[in-house]
Structure formats: C-alpha cells, structure tokens
Amino acid sequence: MITEIAQIDVKPGTEKDFEVAVGKARAAFGRAKGFHGFELHRSIEKPQRYRLVVKWETLENHTVDFRGSENFAEWRGLVGPFFASPPEVEHTNTVVTSA
C-alpha cells in the first residue's frame, strides 16, 4: 500500500468552495484503479493549506493509471481553479504504526 500526500495551498477566501469541490471529486477517485480511500486535512495554523492523503495499491496506480485518466482530468477540473500554487506531492510507505 502506498500513501500519497499532497500539500495544497488554496487562494484566500476559497477554502469552503475547495472543500465542496473535493467532495464532488470522490466519484472520480472511486473509479480509479488501485484506489483505497482518501482524507482531506485542513491546517489549523495555516487555514489556506490542506493535505490530501490518498491510499493506493501501487505507486503506478497513482502516477500512471490515475494521472493518465479522465478521472484525473475531472479531479483537476473541479479543484484546480482553487490552487494558489501547484500542489507538492510525495509518496510514502508505512514503516511503523501504532496499530
């Protein structure tokens, strides 16, 4: 399992609209190969900053399958207008857990 972590800064005043757009994008993610769920977190200290945490079966499910699909185009069409700058994205493997 791979975790994608995207740091997204949105334009001031668009936070609530961005959150609504991410909710609408659930279907696009749900159709994606290897998708296992996501969470959107909003920073308390920097309320225009979000972290989207997405679970993928493999790295390629995100970087190849999703990014090359109509689902990605739908996602970007919904949320892209709110970006203050391009998201910073990285992928991680879990190495220690409390569970």
Image: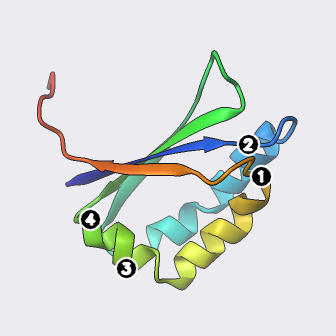
Q: Residue at x 70, y 59 (%)?
A: 79
- Residue beneath the point at 12% across and 29% down: 96
The mark closer to the camera, 3 or 2, is 2
Distance from the alpha carbon under mark 1 to that under mark 4:
26 Å
Dot placed on the residue nearer the N-terminal end, 3 or 1: 3
**Side (left or right) of 48 relative to 68:** right
Circle 4: element type: helix
Amino acid under disc 2: Val
Pointer 1: residues within 10 angstroms few (<14), some, or many (20+)?
many
SS label for mark 1: helix
Instruction: Please give the label number shown on residue 82.
Output: 1
Q: Which residue is mark 3?
A: 65
The tag earlier along the polypeptide, 3 or 4, is 4
- Say which quarter of the image contains residue 46: top right
| Label annotation for residue 59 | 4
The mark nearer the N terminus, 3 or 2, is 2
Asked if the residues shown at circle 1 and circle 4 are in contact, with their CB atoms under 8 angstroms apart, the answer is: no
Seen in the picture, residue 16 relative to 82 is either above or below; the reply is above
